[in-house]
Image (tube, grey):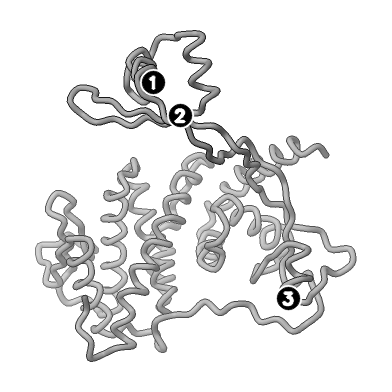
Amino acid sequence: MPNEEKVQELFKRLQEGALAFRDSETYKKFLLFQKNFWPYSFNNQMLIYIQLWMDKKIQPTFVAGFRTWQEEFGRYVKRGEKGIAILAPRITTFNYVTTHFTWHGEDVEIVMRLDQLEAFRKNRPGGTYKGIPLADVLDAYDKEATYSKGSGVIGFMVVYVFDVSQTEGRAFTPPRITTLLETATVPEKLITSIINIAKQSEDVVVNLDGEMFSEGMMGYYVPSERTIAIRRGVSTDQKFKTLLHELAHHFVKKAKLKLQTDQEELVAESVAFIASDHVGLDTTQYSIGYVASWTPEAETFDKMSSAIYELSKQMIKFLDRCGDVLEKPDTEVR
């Protein structure tokens, strides 16, 4: 099959696979799988999961390319095994041109590919470029232009990786995904660390004695005031999970993601579920029940899952910083 057809087939599989996440148990398994495969893009995480777990019921643990297994791990792909198709960017070098000018009192920098600039100069089309009248942009380039080289993506190609279960050879232990906690109960010290660092690095104030909550409501975030309130009297583990949920709302607003209210709630709960699992706390009963009725279209799933992917990485980095307090109990959080 020609490469372009194979690429289109993989994108179609992504859309079809998205619909399977209407099932809450499938969604849970993907979230738990996803946190172990951060080096891969969201789309490639989906492709690995679809082809191994959903197609073959093989739980992915660690994947690598054919040569990588041989040269780095001393293992060989078993005869007859089929590779897992993923998408790799096709990258080439472009000439870029940069200009600076003042527009409506603001300093503006425009970076454009040289071939694109030459086409604009030749055809002189109307309209705007990044919200600025194209005529003004071209005038700026006529006055100042700095040339440079850089790389850019021009398309995708199909490459193949193999799970460790498809290989044999030297003994192999997958890299362990560490957790912050030895037990399933969150220590108050970690919550205190999160509150301190949220204030210091995110300018977010947390109130653990929130009152006047509606039935079933555990917490809320007020973007305009950068404050989080957690319901008074909830368990330590519930307090921790809700704090992560509300911090996820903060990260959504900070990233200026355009999500509808129900979409943002699902993103926040999914991020809280992944981050809680990272520290060894299983919130399945609460979190997965929350998303059980979710029935997105494929396009909606792609938008939301990309947000979950990025924000979960951000939250885990935040938690790892907060977790330092567990290693250094007598050290003030800074």
The residue to which callout 3 is attached is 73
Separation of marks 3 and 1 at Cα, in angstroms: 52 Å
In the rendered image, residue 218, in percent from the top left (x then y), is placed at 23, 65
Say how many tags the image has. Answer: 3
Q: Of all residues shown, which one is farthest toward the right?
A: 79
- Quadrant of the rendered image containing residue 3: top right
Identify whether 51 is placed above or below 91.
below
Comes first in the chain, label 2 or label 1: 2
In the rendered image, residue 123, in percent from the top left (x then y), is placed at 50, 8
Disc 2 + disc 1, Cβ < 8 Å: yes
Which amino acid, by three-letter code, is at mark 3?
Answer: Phe
Quarter of the C terminus within the rendering = bottom left
Which amino acid, by three-letter code, is at mark 1?
Answer: Tyr
- Secondary structure beneath dot 3 equals helix
In the rendered view, does 100 fall on the left or right side of 161? left
- Secondary structure beneath dot 2 equals strand
- Secondary structure beneath dot 1 equals helix
Comes first in the chain, label 3 or label 2: 3
In the rendered view, does 244 fall on the left or right side of 116? left
The residue to which callout 1 is attached is 141
Characterize the local packing of mark 1: few (<14), some (14-19) or many (20 or more) Cα atoms within 10 angstroms.
Answer: some
Marker disc for residue 296: none
